[in-house]
Every structure is written in structure tokens, then in C-alpha cells.
Amino acid sequence: MASDREQPTGEPALRAIAMPADANPSGDIFGGWLLAQMDLAGGHTASQRAKGRVATVAVEGMVFHKPVQVGDLVSCYAAVQRVGRTSIAVLIEAWRRPHHGGPQIKVTQGVFTYVAIDADRRPRAVPPDT
């Protein structure tokens, strides 16, 4: 897992504070909530690269290495890994910083794949990077 010196990969794409409504009775945040935050971060990054609307089509298998607790600041970092004709793969890392401070800790990462779509929600070509 992350060493003490490891830094996030990619650009900051989202920050959120984990709240009690996002947790189980023990105070650990639901994995689905964290996946949703990561998808928001990756969707924003992919839509910027696609210059328009995108839809999530796949998420590579993920492992949650560390828990996120109520009050933690969750930061998602995103980096475009691959661009196809209609698809964009984005590496997303989720890091947490404990509520009362301390170093960031990587909790999970995954590659989310998005497809650029048009107004009719049909796949469209990703424009060249400018």
C-alpha cells in the first residue's frame, strides 16, 4: 500500500467530508459512497477531455485498503490514462485525511472507463487533445 512518501497521482478532482449518513453503525463509510465520489471525480475529468457529456461504462476491480471514517476529508485525484475513439480511461485515487489532521492516506484506486456521448446518448468520437 502507500508508503509515507507516496504522493497522489493526477490532479485534484474532488474533495468531500464523510458524513454520518454515509456510514454504517460503526462509523465506517460505505464503499458505495466512496465509489460515487470517485465516479464524480473521474466523470468530471473525462468530460473535460471529451469536451462534453460522458457516461460511465466500466470500473476495474478495486480493493479498499484502509477504512474512511466519519469526519475524514476524502480527496479524489484523477489522471487520464488512455483515450480511445469514443472512450476515456481515468485512473482515480481516493485519499483520506483524518478529521483532526495528519497525513493523507491512500485508501483505494481504480480505473474508470467513460464513453463520450452525444445529445441522444449515443457514443461519439472523442475530439483530439488541444
Image (cartoon, grey):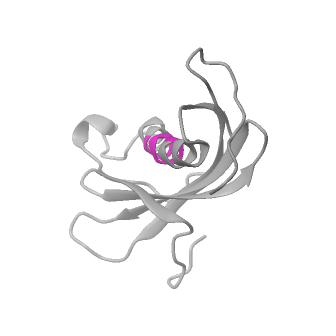
Whole-percent x, y for residue 52 in the image: 53, 36
Which residue of the protein is positioned furthest toward the bottom in this rendering?
5
Indicate left or right for 48 with 56 as reference.
Answer: left
Which residue of the protein is positioned furthest toward the right in this rendering?
85
Residue 87 highlighted magenta (yes or no): no
Q: Which residue shows up at 70% across the image and 49% down it?
A: 128
Q: How many marks?
A: 0
Q: Is residue 62 visible?
A: no
**55 or 6: nearer the viewer:** 55
Is residue 78 positioned above or below 61 on the image?
below
Whole-percent x, y for residue 113 in the image: 67, 40
Which residue of the protein is positioned furthest toward the top in this rendering?
120
Q: Which residue shows up at 59% across the image and 14% down it?
A: 120
Whole-percent x, y for residue 84 in the image: 78, 44
**31 or 38: nearer the viewer:** 38
Q: Which portion, as a residue range, is magenta?
A: 37-43
Whole-percent x, y for residue 119 in the image: 55, 19
Is residue 39 positioned above or below 128 on the image?
above
**77 or 74: nearer the viewer:** 77
**112 or 126: nearer the viewer:** 126
Characterize the magenta stretch by its predominant secondary structure.
helix
Is residue 84 positioned above or below 3 on the image?
above
Is residue 17 positioned above or below 51 on the image?
below
Indicate left or right for 21 with 97 as reference.
Answer: left
Q: Is residue 19 visible?
A: yes
Residue 42 highlighted magenta (yes or no): yes
Q: Which residue shows up at 62% across the image and 57% down it?
A: 130
Indicate left or right for 27 with 38 as reference.
Answer: left
Indicate left or right for 68 with 114 as reference.
Answer: left
Which residue of the protein is positioned furthest toward the front in this rendering?
130
Q: Which residue shows up at 37% across the image and 44% down it?
A: 29
